[in-house]
Amino acid sequence: MTTTPLLALRGICKRFGALHALTRVELEINAGEVVALVGDNGAGKTTLVKVITGAGPADEGVIEWNGRPVRIARPRDAQSLGIASVYQELALCESLDVVGNLFLGHEICRAGVLDEVAMERRARELDLLDVLSVRIPRTRVPVASLSAGQRQAVAIARALLSEPKILILDEPTAALGVGQTAHFLDLIERLREHSLGVLLISHNLGDVKAVADQVAVLRLGRNNGFFDVLTTSQEQIVSSITGATDNAVTHRKTRPWEATR
Amino acid sequence: MTGTEASGDIDRNRAGVVTGRPSARDPRIGDRPPGLKGHASDFVLRLRSGELGWVPGVCAVIVIWTTFQLLDHHFLSPRNLSNLSVDIVGTGLIAVGLVFVLLLGEIDLSVGAVSGLAAAVFAVLNVNSGMPEWLAVATAALVGAGIGALQGFFFARIGVPAFVVTLAGLLVWNGLMLYVLGANGTINLHANGLVSVLTERYFHNRAVAYGLAAVGAAAYFLASYHDERRRRAARVSSRSLGEIAVRTGAVAVIGFAAAYVLNRFEGLPLALLIFLVSVVGLDFVLRRTRYGRKIFAIGGGAEAARLAGVNVVWIRVSAFAVSGTLAAFGGLFLASRVASVGQTSGSTNLLIDAIAAAVIGGVSLFGGRGTPWSALLGVLVVQSIASGMVLIGVQTSVQSMITGGVLLAAVVLDSLSRHSRKSHGVVL
């Protein structure tokens, strides 16, 4: 932990009226590292994702990018930093076809005119639609007619198309079948090899154990432990999620980077 | 987790059924049966899954024209059709503007009132105050744009539902129009003024109408051919040359038939030319620019578009501004048609006609579907009904009921096709 993290959240607070959705949450993601964010329903995982992606900016706290504090007030701010995300839902525009969705927000233009041919060719060249080995019938069908797994593939392909430095995946495997999930986990490992930082939000601890390096647990809007996947048992993580272990040991592990300072 | 895993596989199977492709062929990108056959199978597939597009509109035109022609053989006379082609322009421009708002999945109920107000502003400034015509036209357009932007602001920024904002607008702008017109109530436009000429000028030279048809067909062919060559070079899905030829042929037949009919009366009307140019231009904006792409995106999922970095507020405000501007121009054409602006300008009937036109032509009230061409097709249906009913002497009360019924039928069709898309795995 001696290098500067790619993305660091310090003391993030977010309120919805009287509800303290996030309280002084800390998180770090390094390049080439897969961090899993786990927690019970309503623990604040999606809220935290929205803070990072600019969809729902934080009320308090600092976001650091390569050690420099940055402001992420809008989705565009996050995109220009190099943060791409795949949301649990609401990820695609139903009325656009696959190519339209892939390039939404960064369309390829020629003299101010959308260059459909270039976009379609690029989508094909990069073979993005093969990422999950999901069969997409044609790039020109509206995404509304795709299955959940196919939509997920399109959403992930779109996130990768912008060549991000950090990829945030919110419940990516929920809609996928067995084979697709396996492909997906392979994909995450490939991304890590390409030194992307990945933040994986998942309910499935099996997936988390399979690919993540670090696990950050959120409980009731607060950090409830950081674990090294290799040295931590699944039971430990589960008890941290459910709040069974709120003890000195987890607190000691809470801020590993502070110990090195 | 077994539940979700199983459903993933079912989803995959269902996708195969939806696309209706034999499993032996690889159904991935860029793949589709070649040539006309592929196009036909595509077409049937889309119809079955509820993507009706222009089909109901074209059927309606055929049925309506046949019916009225049987009832009164003057209906399809060059004179009547030529008048029809001028009559559609005012309402048509309003409907085209409305398409921008409908694509967002919203509605603008104020377009009729705005068109009346803009016409009144023009008439008062030009006729009563003696302002130069071009300046008065520009002011009227700005009034429309400003009103649209204001309503858009209330909707997009403050969060008031669009239908409430524009319903309030309907009352306010109609009231303002009456106020602006003052005690006299009716203002006659200058007989040879710019606005009067809009619907009175015809290109008597036959070459103009035929030339336009030829240029249109040639431009369509060249654009398609160029696109197709690039596609082939890039090895992405492309149309066959035969398909392009058939499509160009259809465009040419319609164009030359229209030109022939128009030339048998007074020639190509200036108003129709302006309308066609507007439709082509706005269709280009909607389908071939980033701005248009964003409008479609918001119509199919505003939150998804926002997360993709689209400035949803700005796009929404601008779409309402476009709607207001085109309503203003539509109002000027309507005023030009009767050579005056009066207290009945911009009536509710106009609003209903404009909405009906857009929806009949295939614009979905649920957002994300439709083009300016839909508005053109729809307004042709609506005006054909109106013109035919006048011709055979149907009472105004009955006309009103019939127009209402047609609107309901169009909306029912829209809802049913949406339902069908849903049952085909389309969750729009």
Image (spheres, coloured by chain):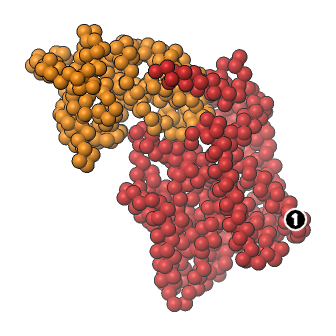
Chain colours: A orange, B red
Depicted B419 relative to depicted B333: above or below: above
How far across and down, in percent of the image, does residue B406 sit?
71, 62
The answer, for residue B279, to whether it is visible in the render is yes
Image quarter of the C terminus of chain B: top right
- Residue B168 left/right relative to B81: left
Chain containing the residue with disc 1: B
Residue B155 versus residue A71 in the image, above or below:
below
Other-residue count near label 1 (Cα within 10 Å), few / some / many at <14 / 14–19 / ≥20: some
Task: Work out which residue is located at the far front of the displayed protein and give it.
Answer: A244
At which x and y percent is residue A128? Answer: 51, 22
Residue identifier under label 1: B69
Most extreme residue toward the bottom is B183
Question: Which residue corresponds to the image point at 40% horizontal and 27% vertical from the top-left?
Answer: A171
The residue depicted at 54 percent of the width and 65 percent of the height is B109
Give how far across and how far down residue B413 sits, in percent. Answer: 68, 52
Residue at 79% across, 30% down? B37
Left-right relation of B221 to B108: right
Image coords of residue A3 (percent x, y): 19, 17
The answer to whether B152 is drawn above or below residue B312 in the figure is below
Q: Which residue is at a point 29% across and 20% down the rendered structure image?
A: A238
Looking at the rendered structure, the number of numbered marks drawn on it comes to: 1
Quick one: which residue is furthest to the top in this view?
A231
* Three-letter code for the amino acid on which mark 1 is drawn: Gln
* Label 1 secondary element: helix
Q: Quadrant of residue B35?
A: top right
Depth check: A104 or B68 in front?
B68
Q: Is residue B60 left or right of residue A211?
A: right
Residue A123 visible in the current orientation? no
